[in-house]
Image: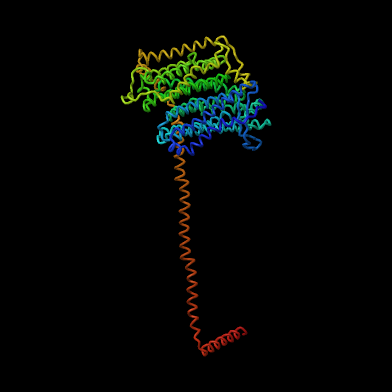
């Protein structure tokens, strides 16, 4: 790891989507107008598929290396050299980043292909693909960054693209408000991320190693063990707590989760790409990337695991009462992200990344499946107006069902392999109460997911006659993507089987070099109850089966009445769940309204005090100018005019002496001489 192989092809994995974005932003509108949408599709999809092909080639090359040398570096140029901080524009490929790269380009490429059918009628087709490409570039920058500042550039980039894509249909107030909400929530987390970077750099500078290059941080992080930041908190703990706060914004965890459900207002491919497969997992990836630092902060890891478990259960309790097909999946995403944070929080980094991967498969399939349903129903998203769609949309139904079985954690589907590993790790590392929260959340997940399946695909169709007349399966560009994601949802977990089934874990072996620091090994090598894992898996499956059975009895066989259950729970539990625990209202009262009051107070102060003082100064200046004008007109000008008039009058009188008569002049001269003689005589006497 100290001497990684230098290569020059990783840059193209990142740059190709950027070129596609630039091309469509500059020429997409003209291309669409003259050559049609197909030309835009070729560019928009082609660059991501090409990046995926390069990622596969890089993965195969990495497999040729011995595990301890699976580190590749593509250093482009020196970025800046300021105050001892030297950073390059460089991309780092190791087992963790190649897994994320394959997810971003692979699942992202499938979503690009799906979008060619879903967005085909949109007049801004070119703009949509330009933003999708730019988002892919930003996410790849985040994943492959060699240093934390470059990671932050990608971190901010995906936030910007998320804002633009959520509010893509910007003429709709709901969409623009949702985009603004996502942007603002993410900025709160990003502030914490920036403070963490400055604090980390300061701490490393004090030990003589000022750096933000990730592999160098891994080398010098142990030196931070004796440093304290504030109130006795170690630098490692302080920095990681701030980084986790940044992760809660990007990955929608308590307290910064409220933006993600509203983000469902955007186009469905956006929901699948940004809020299921890639951007929302950035926080989990960041913690796994900095595992050596988080492993030095037990308090932070406990906070991460606790927040993850509480979020998983909290979001699941909301999902059971929602009726919008995409909103149910949004709360499901928040809940599943909670599982991932528990994984990395208890030191099971590989399990957390494994669930990140399988979640990308089945959640993208679920979101795109919901998009197929919405597409078939002309934009309808309320499950109460659906039903009986399985025979009209067979491909959508079967792939949606496979993904549902995966997210519920039913073997042998992918979700079972990854969720079971996290749930078991929570118990095995000494956190039984965290395991309990995840266990309950698993049962609720089964209930709300099968509730969604039964309300959407079973029973009688509850929509309009016009919708029933136009029901049809999605075009091949969409349905083929669903089939691929359905297959991945089924078999994608086979790369890491639970230990009680078989000792087959190539995924874990592949990632092992990333998590081999002494501080990480110290928190991951805590296995206490190996033989009990199978029993705990069976216990989890019993609760999942109970959740499925309750949904089946209520929404398919209708032996139980959903309305009666709602009335029975119509008090605090149902009301809180249906209204999402009034979190948005709480933010409105606690943050938005005080902020608006403060802005109005600032506006009043500016209008009446600041502007008043300015206006008073202006009025005083005007009055002074008026008085100065009066003084100038009547005093200064008056004195000048008086002097002029006196001079003129004197001149007029003196002019009379100039008669031209010599006799007159002689008489005057004689008079003057007489006066002079008289004066002298007087003076001498």
For the point 58% across and 17% down, which residue is it? 506
Observer-nearest of 349 and 648: 349
For the point 50% across and 84% down, which residue is it? 658
Can see residue 585? no
Give the quadrant of the C terminus.
bottom right
Horizontally, residue 131 falls left or right of residue 54, namely: left
Observer-nearest of 334 and 480: 480
Observer-nearest of 622 and 272: 272
Residue 424, picture quadrant = top right
Q: Most extreme residue toward the left, as rendered? A: 465
Observer-nearest of 528 and 573: 528
Horizontally, residue 353 falls left or right of residue 31, namely: right
Image height of 298 relative to 161, above or below: above
Horizontally, residue 462 falls left or right of residue 414, namely: left
Percent of width and height locating residue 436: 50, 15
User: Tag count in the figure?
Assistant: 0
For the point 50% across and 87% down, which residue is it? 660
Can see residue 66? yes
Percent of width and height locating residue 558: 35, 14
Give the quadrant of the N terminus.
top right
Percent of width and height locating residue 333: 47, 23
Horizontally, residue 397 falls left or right of residue 82, namely: left
Percent of width and height locating residue 14: 56, 31
């Amino acid at each position: 790891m100290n001497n990684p192989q230098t290569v020059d092809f990783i840059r193209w994995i990142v740059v190709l989507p950027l070129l596609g974005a630039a091309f469509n932003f500059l020429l997409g509108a003209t291309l669409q107008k003259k050559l049609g949408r197909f030309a835009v599709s070729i560019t928009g999809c082609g660059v991501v598929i090409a990046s995926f092909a390069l990622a596969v080639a890089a993965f195969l090359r990495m497999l040729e290396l011995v595990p301890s040398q699976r580190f590749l570096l593509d250093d482009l140029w020196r970025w800046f050299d300021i105050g001892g901080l030297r950073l390059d524009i460089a991309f780092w490929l190791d087992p963790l980043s190649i897994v994320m790269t394959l997810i971003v380009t692979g699942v992202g490429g499938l979503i690009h292909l799906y979008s060619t059918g879903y967005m085909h009628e949109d007049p801004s087709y070119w703009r949509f693909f330009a933003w999708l490409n730019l988002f892919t570039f930003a996410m790849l920058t985040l994943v492959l960054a060699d240093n934390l500042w470059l990671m932050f550039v990608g971190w901010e980039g995906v936030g910007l693209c998320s804002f633009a894509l959520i509010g893509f249909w910007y003429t709709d107030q709901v969409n623009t408000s949702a985009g603004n909400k996502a942007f603002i929530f993410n900025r709160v987390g990003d502030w914490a991320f920036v403070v963490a970077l400055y604090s980390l750099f300061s701490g490393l500078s004090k030990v003589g190693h000022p750096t933000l290059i990730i592999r160098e941080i891994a080398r010098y992080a142990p030196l931070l063990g004796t440093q304290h930041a504030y109130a006795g908190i170690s630098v490692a703990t302080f920095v990681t707590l701030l980084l986790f706060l940044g992760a809660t914004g990007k990955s929608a965890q308590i307290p910064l989760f409220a933006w993600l459900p509203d983000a469902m207002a955007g186009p469905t491919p956006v929901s699948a790409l940004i809020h299921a497969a890639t951007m929302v997992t950035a926080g989990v990836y960041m913690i796994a990337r900095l595992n050596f630092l988080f492993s030095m902060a037990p308090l932070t890891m406990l906070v991460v695991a606790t927040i993850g478990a509480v979020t998983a259960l909290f979001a699941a309790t909301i999902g059971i009462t929602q009726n919008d097909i995409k909103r149910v999946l949004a709360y499901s995403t928040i809940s599943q992200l909670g599982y991932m944070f528990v994984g990395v929080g208890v030191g099971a980094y590989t399990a957390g990344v494994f669930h990140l991967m399988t979640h990308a498969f089945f959640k993208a399939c679920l979101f795109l499946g919901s998009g197929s349903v919405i597409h078939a129903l002309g934009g309808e998203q309320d499950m109460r107006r659906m039903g009986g769609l399985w025979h009209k949309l067979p491909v959508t139904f079967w792939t949606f069902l496979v993904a549902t079985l995966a997210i519920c954690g039913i073997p042998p589907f992918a979700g079972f392999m990854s969720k079971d590993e996290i749930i078991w790790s929570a118990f095995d590392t000494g956190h039984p109460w965290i395991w309990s929260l995840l266990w309950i959340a698993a049962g609720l997940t089964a209930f709300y997911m099968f509730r969604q399946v039964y309300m959407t695909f079973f029973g009688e169709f509850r929509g309009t006659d016009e919708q029933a007349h136009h029901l049809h399966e999605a075009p091949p560009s969409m349905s083929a993507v669903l089939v691929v994601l359905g297959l991945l949802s089924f078999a994608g977990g086979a790369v890491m089987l639970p230990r009680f089934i078989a000792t087959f874990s190539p995924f874990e072996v592949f990632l092992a070099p990333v998590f081999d620091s002494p501080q990480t090994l110290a928190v991951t090598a805590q296995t206490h109850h190996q033989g009990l894992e199978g029993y705990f898996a069976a216990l989890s499956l019993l609760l999942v089966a109970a959740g499925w059975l309750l949904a089946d009895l209520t929404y398919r066989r209708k032996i139980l009445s959903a309305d009666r259950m709602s009335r029975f729970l119509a008090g605090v539990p149902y009301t809180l769940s249906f209204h999402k625990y009034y979190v948005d209202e709480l933010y409105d009262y606690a943050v938005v309204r005080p902020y608006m009051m403060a802005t109005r107070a600032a506006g009043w102060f500016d209008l009446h005090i600041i502007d008043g003082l300015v206006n008073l100064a202006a009025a005083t200046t005007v009055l002074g100018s008026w008085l100065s004008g009066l003084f100038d007109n009547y005093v200064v000008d008056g004195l000048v005019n008086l002097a002029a008039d006196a001079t003129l009058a004197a001149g007029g009188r003196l002019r009379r002496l100039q008669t031209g008569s010599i006799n007159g002049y002689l008489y005057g001269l004689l008079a003057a001489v007489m006066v002079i003689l008289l004066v002298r005589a007087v003076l001498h006497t």
